[in-house]
Image (cartoon, rainbow, N blue to C red):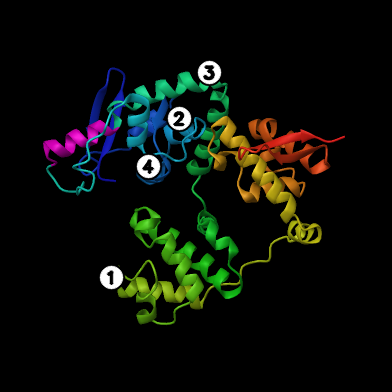
């Protein structure tokens, strides 16, 4: 973390230099009832957890909120343009924020990032209340905060990379082992995990299982990175000594194979996509393919069976699966639900 920007009422902005000041006092604010407004907060929360030992107790993420208003993971610059008609400066976007002293241009650019963030929050708040979706955003921000506020154990680190779930055999064992090593190395160095090696590198290593430093240096995601000998040795050791991953409960997988849910998943996916278009919600917020499969399989813990998603999606999906309604095109590239006799 090279710089922290804080804004409060009246467009006041302060820039904190973490290279020269103690940030642990922020934990007192995090533990208070103050609501923190942030944009795409995941990486910031990871750093705050490492530096301050805690994260905000209450959070409103403007990127999450934008998903409930028709925008899919927009940048902060897009929110400024669409909501406020403001174009953020671009000239210092790729600057070296670790250089000192910062120039006036760097400070101005950094301040502009948060100067109007509370105005964006106010705009979103008004619109979300009009749409009746503010409780949805609150729930989603709390779920997100709960996940980010609890540091995963090194043994669970692989779950952060969804592509690893598809691996099998030695590749799966290696992926778990390397992810665990990366988590522990990041904690030792007190840096974000992606600064150790990237997610892409872990995926590529697990797929190719290199046996030497030369082979490791050709791995996608590492080919442009100068790897230290001790880092290379640690990665290769993690591959060679990767313990077998315990076999998970396969009951749900067996059920899925027996029932062949592909047709049902395709129908429900099409309906959810149309629903998201009509409601102007990011489809990924409604449900992923895994969420849909879990609902169809009868998993009581499926996200689509509970909360606001259960109200918006769950009951209609049950009607689709029971044959009470069918899907049809209206001739204008829209999917409609039609009752069946």
Please report whichever mark, 3 or 4, sits nearer to the chain's N-terminal start. Answer: 4
Q: Are marks 2 and 1 in contact (CB under 8 Å)?
A: no
Give the mark, 3 or 2, whose residue is nearer the N terminus: 2
* Mark pair 3, 4: CA separation: 30 Å
Question: Residue 257, image x and y in percent?
Answer: 77, 61
**In this view, 295 is above or below 39:** below
Q: Which residue is mark 2?
A: 60
| SS category of the residue bearing label 1 | loop
Q: Nearer the viewer, residue 153 or 116?
A: 116
Marks 4 & 1, CB-CB < 8 Å contact: no
The range drawn in magenta is 102-113
Label 3's element? helix
Query: Is 180 a magenta residue?
Result: no
Residue 106 in the figure: left or right of residue 127: left
6 left or right, relative to 254: left
Disc 2 or 1, which lies upstream in sequence?
2
Q: Which residue is mark 1?
A: 226
Q: Does 253 appear above or below 206?
A: above
Q: Please determine whether, in this image, residue 227 is positioned above or below residue 282.
A: below
Residue 248 at x, y percent in the picture:
69, 62
Q: Which residue is mark 4?
A: 44
The quadrant the C terminus occupies is: top right
Looking at the rendered structure, the secondary structure element under dot 2 is: strand
Q: What is the x, y in percent for residue 200?
A: 43, 63
Crowd tier of the residue under label 1, counting other residues whose Cα lies within 10 Å: few below 14, some 14–19, many 20 or above: few
The label nearer to you, 1 versus 3, is 3
Which residue position holds label 3? 130
Whole-Å distance between the Cαs marked 2 and 1?
39 Å
**Alpha-carbon distance for marks 1 and 3?**
53 Å
């Amino acid at each position: 973390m090279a710089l922290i920007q804080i804004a409060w009422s009246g467009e006041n902005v302060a820039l904190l230099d973490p290279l020269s000041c103690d940030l642990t006092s922020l934990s007192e604010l995090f533990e208070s009832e103050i609501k923190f407004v942030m944009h795409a907060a995941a990486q910031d929360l990871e750093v705050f957890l490492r530096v301050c030992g805690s994260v905000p107790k209450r959070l409103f993420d403007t990127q999450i909120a934008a998903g409930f208003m028709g925008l899919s993971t927009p940048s902060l610059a897009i929110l400024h343009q669409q909501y406020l008609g403001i174009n953020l400066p671009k000239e210092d976007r790729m600057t070296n924020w670790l250089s000192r002293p910062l120039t006036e241009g760097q400070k101005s650019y950094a301040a502009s990032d948060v100067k109007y963030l509370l105005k964006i929050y106010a705009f979103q708040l008004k619109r979300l209340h009009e749409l009746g979706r503010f409780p949805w955003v609150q729930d989603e921000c709390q779920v997100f905060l709960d996940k980010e506020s609890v540091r995963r154990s090194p043994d669970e680190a692989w779950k952060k990379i969804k592509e690893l779930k598809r691996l099998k055999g030695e590749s799966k064992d290696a992926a778990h082992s390397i992810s665990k090593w990366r988590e522990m190395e990041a904690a030792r160095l007190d840096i974000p995990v992606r600064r150790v090696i990237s997610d892409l590198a872990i995926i590529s290593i697990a797929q190719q299982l290199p046996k030497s430093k030369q082979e490791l240096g050709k791995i996608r995601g590492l080919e442009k990175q100068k790897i230290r000998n001790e880092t290379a040795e640690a990665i290769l050791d993690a591959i060679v000594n990767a313990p077998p991953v315990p076999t998970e409960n396969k009951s749900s997988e067996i059920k899925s194979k027996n029932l062949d849910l592909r047709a049902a998943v395709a129908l429900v996916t099409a309906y959810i996509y149309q629903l998201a278009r009509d409601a102007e919600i990011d489809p990924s917020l409604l449900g992923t393919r895994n969420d849909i499969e879990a609902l169809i399989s009868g998993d009581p813990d499926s996200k689509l069976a509970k909360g606001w998603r259960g109200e918006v999606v769950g009951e209609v999906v049950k009607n689709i699966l029971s044959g009470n309604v069918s899907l049809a095109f209206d001739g204008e590239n829209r999917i409609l639900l039609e009752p069946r006799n």
